[in-house]
Amino acid sequence: MLVHSKDLILPQERSIDVHEEFTRGHFVTNTTKHRFSALAHDQINEQQNAIVKGDGGFVGLTEKPDALRRWMVSAPETSRIHIEASDNTDNPDDTKHHEEKQTKQNTRQLVETIDDMGNPFEEDTSDLYTLDKKVVMSPEASCRSRQQNQLEKLSTNL
């Protein structure tokens, strides 16, 4: 067994202060507000480098000393801005009530229309009309619409 593996088996017996810091989470840095997004300190540097460099890689920076200095100065701030932007977009619950509000409004309007005009599924008519205004489509347009629906059904069955 490796020496490092043996050290991890019973850390509370070997080094009490290290074990206490470990259980408090002082060996990691949270990258977002989510509880399980923590990374070990040595991995944070690698992640920040990857975020700042993007797809271009490190080659261009090592060939141009001015570009390397600019990157070294701007990397922490660029990384911070990236993390803040990620935190703002990671929380879909902030806008959930907007979607629910629109769905409730649409449902309420449909129920009101059915109450006012009657249930369109119970009517025995060949007329094709809109639910909100009860505008009747001309017989020619209605026939073309039915033909189009039949053609679509046939094409999907082929």
Image (cartoon, grey):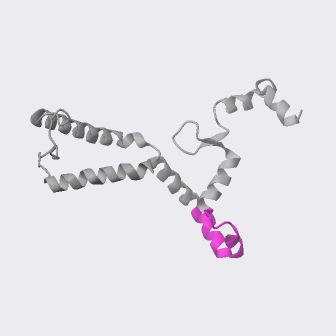
Does 22 appear in magenta? no
Q: Main secondary structure of the magenta part?
A: helix
| Of 55 and 134, the residue lying toward us | 134
Residue at x 17%, y 37% (from the top left corner): 120
Q: Is residue 60 left or right of residue 103?
A: right
Q: Is residue 137 left or right of residue 84?
A: left
Query: Which quarter of the picture shows residue 140?
Result: bottom left
Instruction: Give x and y (percent) for residue 21.
Output: 68, 32
Task: Identify the residue shown where x is 54% and y is 60%.
Answer: 78
> What residue range appears in magenta?
53-75
The image shows residue 3, relative to residue 79, as above or below, that is: above
* Residue at image point 52% right, 55% down: 82
- Screen quadrant of the N terminus: top right
Q: Position of residue 145 (x, y in %)?
A: 24, 53
Residue furthest right as drawn: 1
Judging depth in this view, the residue of 144 and 16 nearest the camera is: 144
- Is residue 148 found left or right of 134 in the rendered image? right
